[in-house]
Image (tube, rainbow, N blue to C red):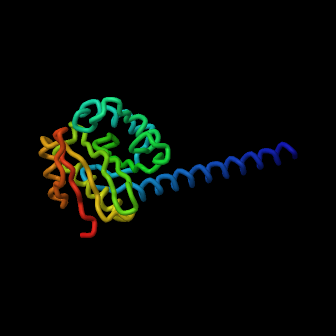
Amino acid sequence: MIASYIKKIIFLMSFVCIVCVSFGMYYYSKFLQNHAIDIGLHACICEFNPLCDTEPILNIFKNNWHALVEDVDYSPEFMMQNRTPDNDEKHFGILVIKVIREKNKLAAFTAYYMKTPEEGIVLFLAVDHNFRGKRYGYKLMQYALKELKYMGAKSVGLWVLINNIPARKIYRELGFIEKVYDERESVYLEYNANF
């Protein structure tokens, strides 16, 4: 009689566990779907996932170091780990990182933040060379601009190399205006988010 009672308890506990796991998997998949934006071509804009996105982003940095970074001591690992545009501890956690995944492979990423309550900065926008020509840079920048405007930005700025013609074309299409040229062969562009 006790053995029968124990079997029923074990069966009931197993059933509850299966229901809980199933509900958790369902909720998790719905949560991810609500936070990924489908952009066609089996691609979506998603939150940065340190476990699967760090290595592909480091490869993009490695292959495009001169276009992305001017300081040889810059650490993309530190930036991603601390979500910060610099080494100042009070900026830890302010950097937003979004990625585009195509068929579960990282195709592009952007990193942006609010420098002041009304000024947003796009720190990085880069597309893996295997995924260029699909307008991913344009789509990711559109997304970043919309998010920064939502965060309160009245203007958004970024630096780009003067010889990066494809990127400058995208920025002009989106409404950026070239403001300042510097001795490092870069140009500062600004977007008026009030439009």
Residue 148: quarter of image: bottom left
- Picture coordinates of residue 80 (x, y %)? 42, 40
Viewer-proximal residue among 140 and 8: 140
Viewer-proximal residue among 194 and 41: 194
- The number of numbered badges drawn on the structure is 0
- Picture coordinates of residue 138 (x, y %)? 21, 53
**Above or below, comparing residue 27 to residue 78 in the picture:** below
Q: Quadrant of the C terminus?
A: bottom left
- Picture coordinates of residue 97 (x, y %)? 38, 48
Residue 73 falls left or right of residue 165:
right
Query: What residue is drawn where x is 21% and y is 37%?
Result: 129
Viewer-proximal residue among 73 and 122: 73
Residue 149 falls left or right of residue 169:
right
The outermost residue toward the front is 183
Residue 173: quarter of image: bottom left
Residue 191: quarter of image: bottom left
The outermost residue toward the right is 1
